[in-house]
Amino acid sequence: MKARSLLIVLALIAVAAFATLNWPAFNASSSLSLGVATIQAPLGLVMLGVLAFFMLFFLVFVVYLQTTVMLDSRQHAKELRANRELADKAEASRFTELRAFLDGELKRQANQDAQFQAALLARLDRLGVDLRSAVEHSGNTVAAFIGELDDRLERGTSRPRGGAPSP
């Protein structure tokens, strides 16, 4: 039990014990003034009746407050659940959009890589052709030089020793 509830129960027990112990005094009739009239009634019972009325009034008031709080709590829980579902759906759609974006970017990157690879292979082919051409040209040049040297050597061996070169 909460401290407040325990305090209220103890106060009610104290009032009930006081009324029980002083029951003859509570039943003693006395003259009571109502402002416009005077009546004969037991003052103790009138005060107990007023106390009971206010206790009942406050009990109804507490029940009303708790009921409204519970209803508000349920309404807030429903709204919270709806907002959570909405947030989950929004998050799921954001993940879907992110996945689609990443897939598109990966495809674009793959296409870019394929284009770069194709351009690189084409350039390597051109460089290979140019290199073969340069090697062939160098080979032809070397062959021409060797042929010229060979011709010179052959002409040089056909001339007499010590003589003038032949025309």
Image (spheres, rainbow, N blue to C red):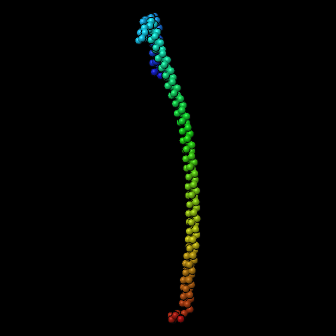
The residue at 45%/21% (across/down) is 4
Foreground pick, 19 / 91: 19
Residue 163 % position (x, y): 51, 95
Foreground pick, 30 / 95: 30
Residue 124 % position (x, y): 56, 68
Is residue 151 in sight in this rendering?
Answer: yes
Q: Is residue 47 above or below residue 87?
A: above
Residue 88 % position (x, y): 56, 41
Foreground pick, 81 / 155: 81
Residue 70 % position (x, y): 52, 28
The residue at 56%/58% (across/down) is 109
The quarter of the displayed image where residue 152 is located = bottom right
The quarter of the displayed image where residue 22 is located = top left
The residue at 51%/27% (across/down) is 68
Is residue 22 in sight in this rendering?
Answer: no
Q: Is residue 88 above or below residue 60?
A: below
Please, which residue is most extreme toward the front here?
A: 36
